[in-house]
Amino acid sequence: MNIDFSQIKFRASSWGNLLAESKEKGNPIGKTCAAELIKIYNQEVYGRKKDITTKQMDKGKLCEPEAIQLFSLLEGKMYYKNEERLENEWFTGHPDIVDEAVTECNDIKCSYELDTFMPKLIEEADKSYVAQLNVYHSLLGTQYGHIVYCLISAPMQILEQEKRSLLWRMDVVSEMSPEYLKAAEELTHLMTFDDIDPRERVIKIPVPRNDELIEKMKAKVPVMRQWLHDFHKKHMNLYPKTEEVV
């Protein structure tokens, strides 16, 4: 099985793990980075990719169009979902929003609830998202960008899933039980936000271009390509392949 690992390009979403520092002095590939590289290896060699989904991720996908509309409304200009996957010599990526003049890019995140949205106002940008945005800056040549957290009401299918989970946890006689109806009403209130002013439902965290970080990522690419090559060689030589195994 011949694969040219020298041509592998690394996805923007992987760099939070790929940049993880090794605890072993002199070893550029730590456990977290190696685990991510093995996932990449499995996809490249065997076409296997495990898609991890959570209710938060499901909401993000379902609510992204509404979040982009809300962001456009507050910014006073129309943004559209970018449908083009980009790549260069080192990276691949799919930024959410690229402005028409290609001067900035923004990544949309839909918070699951108010209690996870509000802390973003005082938190620094997540390091994995900073790496992701800087991959986009490298791909686009942009200088500015934001992680845009939006508070969007849960769509009906997610709300109904949460209600079913609530019903199971409460172990009541039926969904018409008064205690369940009251709890379901409280749950709906917790997961819908149309009563909150739209101007209070978007938090932008700036992520400007960081050329030092981009160069650090570029410099790690050949190291990781070599690691994948060596890993593959080790894997292919577990047993001699001089004759067919039936």
Image (cartoon, rainbow, N blue to C red):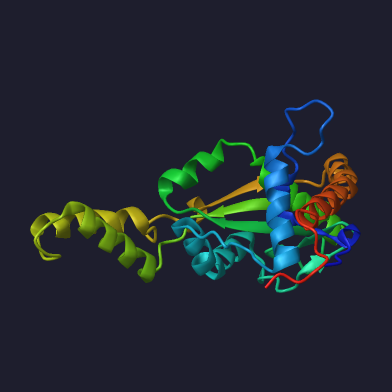
Q: Is residue 192 visible?
A: yes
Q: Residue at x 67, y 64 (%)?
A: 96
The quadrant in which the N terminus is found is bottom right
Residue placed furthest toward the top: 25
x then y, percent, for residue 157: 37, 70
Tell how many labels.
Answer: 0
x then y, percent, for residue 181: 16, 60
Q: Is residue 145 visible?
A: no
Q: Is residue 160 above or below residue 54?
A: below
Q: Residue at x 87, y 56 (%)?
A: 90
Q: Is residue 184 above or below residue 218?
A: below
- Residue 10, picture quadrant: bottom right
Nearer to us in this view, 46 or 195: 46
x then y, percent, for residue 84: 75, 73
Determine whether, in the image, residue 203 is placed left or right of residue 200: right
Q: Is residue 84 above or below residue 207?
A: below
- Residue 87, picture quadrant: bottom right
x then y, percent, for residue 102: 82, 64
Nearer to us in this view, 223 or 149: 223
Determine whether, in the image, residue 120 is placed left or right of residue 30: left
The quadrant in which the C terminus is found is bottom right
Nearer to us in this view, 10 or 94: 10
Q: Residue at x 85, y 55 (%)?
A: 138
- Residue 65, picture quadrant: bottom right
